[in-house]
Amino acid sequence: MKNNYIKMNSNEKYLSLGNLFNLIKDISENKSTAMQLEIFYAMFNNQDVNKTTVNNYCTGYRAISVLYKQIYIDLSEKYEKDKYIFIDIVTNILSILNETIYQKDKINLEIINNNKKLKLLCERLYLLAKSDVYVSELFLNKVNKLYEENNLYECLINYLIYTVLENKQPRYEEKIKITTNKEEIDDYLRIKLYEGISYITSLKELAKKNNMYANAELGSLEFSGLITGNINYEESYNYYLESAKKDHPKGCWMVANLILTNKVNKDFNIAWEYLNKAIKLGNIAALNTMGNCYLNGNNPEKTIDKNKATKYYEKASEYGYVFALNNLGKIYEKTNPEKSINYYKLSADLNNSWALNRVGEYYRKNNDLDTAYIYYKKAIESPYQEVCYYAYYNLAKYYYLENDPKKAKEYLIIADENNVKEAVYLLNDKFNMLKLK
């Protein structure tokens, strides 16, 4: 992997899990090399994780797993009614900070709130939060108020929740090369921010003046059918082509993509020219598309080159491009199942619905239905354009096994309405329908 992701534990710009771990290690006198794992165990009460995975979470190379996030989602929901729900985790962290094993039946809020090292930790976390441009003023005011009230217990809890659930990782250095035109950007932003109801009309007027940003935006709107209510790939292509002529990275990729996916009938050479141009301009999606071209033999040589395809997928995956991660997972499914599922997990941790469902299937096949349920449920929480509807089908089976036929039928109907053939079969089968009534 190239080191183009932003390290979350080697600077003071991010309120991240890695920097939280660093501060705990720094304040504690324990300098053991196993300290990182120890802190992870303390926070998640889970020792079934390896050193490399924890290190990847801390550096920010990968997103924190859905499973670990779910622990904090559940705790956060209970926290509203039970402020003591985090007491074990805070006690564990206190034990690390002070190198003292606290008896959990004897610990109380007074001991926690008067701990000097915990106070120092909260102070330094606040300084870190202030330097993070992604941390809101509302959050800063909240933790500062708790600190001033000497409520270190709740202060720390807010930091824990933020680093696990709110901080976005991985983050990547900007690599897109685009020659910006200040006048065109100003014109585009002016209508984007101020035109309101006449937005589309204004965009079209701007596009007539050959504004690449307006052309790219109109291309996107036509592609999604958001102008007339009907998808118009030809119009989308025309708008994107105009933006591509002025080196708009996405415009170049979309010109190629529309041709290669047979959305428009244009010369293959145009697609190949603009696909290569998009890659030179730093468009990540274009790397994945190029991988597809070599995997499927859709290239000038008309040859299938799996090695070349893999290299392009790997380049795109370095930027956390979920479709490239999924493609790598597919490539290794038969030859290296463990490597395959690891790629799917990376994509799932970035909330890709298809990968979440796939990982859910992995756990189901390994008889871990509870973990499978977490992934299936997360899969259907994606935006409707991105949802993998097989997750509804899999959840329907889960609810049936949990003796909830009403919920099972509800989810089967959703899957059926979205062309999941297996759901159609179950709904049409009289015997199964009797079960689901």
Image (cartoon, rainbow, N blue to C red):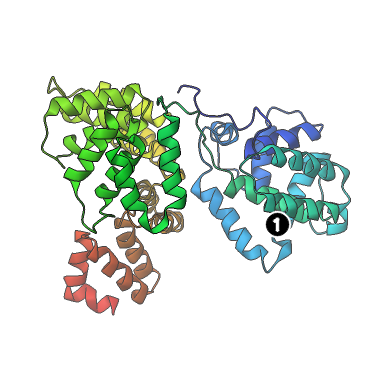
Tell me which amino acid carries mark 1.
Phe
Would you name the residue on which mark 1 appears?
Answer: 86
| Residue 347 picture quarter | top left
Binning the other alpha carbons within 10 Å of mark 1 as few (below 14), some (14 to 19) or many (20 upward) gives some
Q: Is residue 230 left or right of residue 19?
A: left
* Front-most of residues 378 and 211: 211
Q: How many marks?
A: 1
The one nearer the camera, 277 or 50, is 277
Q: Nearer the viewer, residue 94 or 162?
A: 162
Q: Is residue 192 left or right of residue 204?
A: right
Residue drawn where x is 17% and y is 31% of the image: 296
Q: Residue 126's x, y, as percent?
A: 75, 43
Q: Is residue 144 visible?
A: yes
Residue sitting at x 32%, y 68%: 411
* Vertical side of 395 occupied by 252: above or below: above
Residue 331 visible in this rendered orientation of the protein: no
The quarter of the picture where the N terminus appears is top left
Tag 1, which secondary structure?
Answer: helix
Q: Position of residue 34 (x, y in %)?
A: 67, 31
Q: Nearer the viewer, residue 317 or 89?
A: 317
In-image side of 15 versus 399 (left or right): right
Q: Residue visible at 78% across and 50% down?
A: 144
x%, y% of residue 73? 57, 57
Residue positioned 73% across, 63% down in the render: 83
Q: Quadrant of residue 255?
A: top left
Q: Is residue 427 above or below residue 104?
A: below
